[in-house]
Amino acid sequence: MSARALQVRGIRKAYPGVVAVAGLDLEVERGEVFGLLGPNGAGKTTTLEMIEGLTPADAGEIQVLGLDWRRHGAEIRSRIGVQLQSTSLFNKITPREALTLYGSYYPRRRSAEELLDLVQLRDKADAYHITLSGGQMQRLALALALVNEPELVFLDEPTTGLDPQARRGLWDVVRRMKGEGRTVILTTHYMDEAEALCDRLAIIDHGRLLTAGTPLGLIQQLAIPSVVELTFAGAAPDPAGFAARLELEVTGRADCWEIPTRDPKALLPRLLEAAEAAALAYEQIHVRRATLEDVFLHLTGRSLRD
Amino acid sequence: MLLYRQFKMEWLLYSRDRVAMFWAFAFPMIMLLGFGVIFGTGSTPQLTLVVAGEVQTQAGRDLVGALERTPLKLLRLDPGAAAARWAKGETAAELDPAGPGWRLKVNTYLAAQGQLTAQIVQQAGLAAQLREDGREPGFLPVLTESPGHAHSANYAAFLLPGLLGMNLLSMGLFSVGMVNVSYREKGKFRRLAVTPLPKWIFLLGQVLHRLTLTLLQSALMLALGWFAFGISNQGSYLLLAAVMALGTACFMAMGFALAGFAQTAEGYGAISNVFFLPMMFLSGVYFTLDAAPHWLQRSVVALPLSPYLHTLRAIFNDGSGLSGQWGGLAVVAGWTAACFLLAVKKFKWA
């Protein structure tokens, strides 16, 4: 019980013309929910697939549950669960059959009925895979990942394409997994998901690790824990002049301005006064806590959403 | 146990593809019926000789008289019609008037038939000359008999084991190999790659599924052969089944092995043809290679279809036992083992 859930050192993966992952280190402890947060194309899926043993790494070391892929492949596979970014099953297999079939590959398996209830696919249990909706396919993929009572579960973008209710449902399943003592490693490009689920996370971009830590810790590290937002009706004007006058950093977005600050109480009066003086036609003003989105923005100058 | 479950799942999924299942059974039966009906009347095709015009000499008329006593089908045409038929390429051999006698013209594109016809014409010519001298030519009695015990002289009887072998070959190479490459291309195996399912069990499950499928198909073909043409298996059914099982395993292993070398379905199509076409044409499925050069005959025997068909025919047409077949079976078994090992080694889930 002493080995870490995951230890990765310096993994690299290059394809002709592009370096997908350029030297990444990761450490995941047992029983935690760990997130890989980054925009599309950051290399999250490639990283995960190298860890899952699907894609061979060009360089680096990977230890899953303290074991090496080359020497203990079969054992690792029997102890992990994987939800791929997109799961393609045979067209005419039903969820119940798939769960039973995949269950048969493991020494220990959960009943198909239990899993169907867990992901709420009971009423589609005997439908052909090809007739399932995208969300239903994803729920089945999640159930398949849990069929062997895994110690370590990998979820690749588990809520992409799900409606809000289904997202919440999945978050509940992940919390339940953690309650059962499983380690969960997931990738996402949703900041709210990372904040809601992850005990710790790593932010990656362009195949590199930018930073790692707890969500709260990363935000606090930012040293700019609050953001004042000014929303405008219609398009937001260019903040350059206003920002220069106040000697503030203002990020202009399509319909709002964002002003990160350490001390919103002190900033607000100055801001309101200046806005009045410049006859700034803003509609709303509100102060919010900084989020991982802001962390990412600070680190890369870009938004998590493309 | 795991293998049994894989096997069951293969059958379950296969049975849900109604169209594929239908053709798997219908196609070999249609082939058998078709060939049996077309070639059923006899194994030698009738040869036609065009006689263009007339030769008024006694010798000329005698030759035509002698030709009428041969099994050749004589087609008398006037020179114009004969020339038109020749121009269209339909004539294999034509008898033209040349001075006091005849001259024979043979079509290079139909050389096989033409040369055969020419030989018969020469024979007729010699017979006519002998008769002129007042003697009757004496021909040796020729007995056509197929080796082995009493059985149908229908070409379909020769064909049936060949078709059985072909069916297995095409199923192994095309159905199994192609389907697997296509599935891999579509990413249907990726999810399996992260499970502890061993590759060899996955492949073996498919082999067993196809094995049982072939046995059913072959049983149907045998039944059809019996009812439609009176062809029956002269040897032991158990032996026949065992040899066919070996054949199935062999050609499927070949399909899997080739599948390991192709990335796309099109690529697989190209690679498999390199193996399939030579085997199909040279391995005695449709005709024997007795007239082919020795080096070709010897090299073809190294491919598994040839010895396999030889053994199948020996059992089916001649009622032979296993004695004398061990060499051929060893070749097939050797190919099976080698291909299966190669298949497991080269098989990638994704």
Image: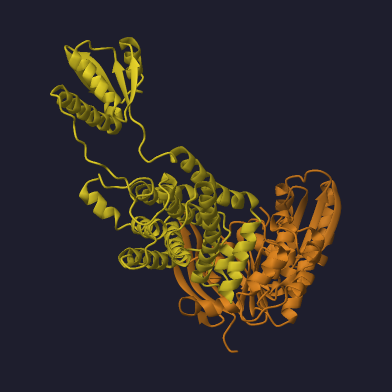
Chain colours: A orange, B yellow
The image quadrant of residue A86 is: bottom right
Q: Position of residue A260 (x, y in %)?
A: 73, 61
Q: Position of residue A266 (x, y in %)?
A: 81, 65
Residue B339 percent across, percent down from the top left:
39, 64
> For the image shown, how many numbered marks are present on the structure?
0
Q: Residue furthest left?
A: B133
**Quadrant of res A38:** bottom right
In this rendering, the answer to whether B206 lies above or below B143 is below
* Residue B274 or residue A160, whichever sits in front: B274
Indicate whether A234 appears above or below A56: above
The residue under the point 80% across, 66% down is: A122
Q: Is residue B153 above or below residue A37?
A: above
Q: Is residue B185 visible?
A: no
Quadrant of image for the N terminus of chain A? bottom right
In the rendered image, residue B26, in percent from the top left (x then y), is placed at 57, 48
User: Which image quadrant for residue A189?
Assistant: bottom right
| Residue toward you, A302 or B51 | B51
Q: Looking at the image, which residue is at 73% across and 82% down?
A: A180
Question: As drawn, which residue projects farthest toward the bottom?
Answer: A1
Q: In this image, A200 relative to B270: left or right?
A: right
Residue, far front: B134
**Relative to residue A109, is residue A206 drawn left or right?**
left
Q: Is residue B159 visible?
A: yes
User: Residue B254, relative to residue B144: is it above or below?
Assistant: below
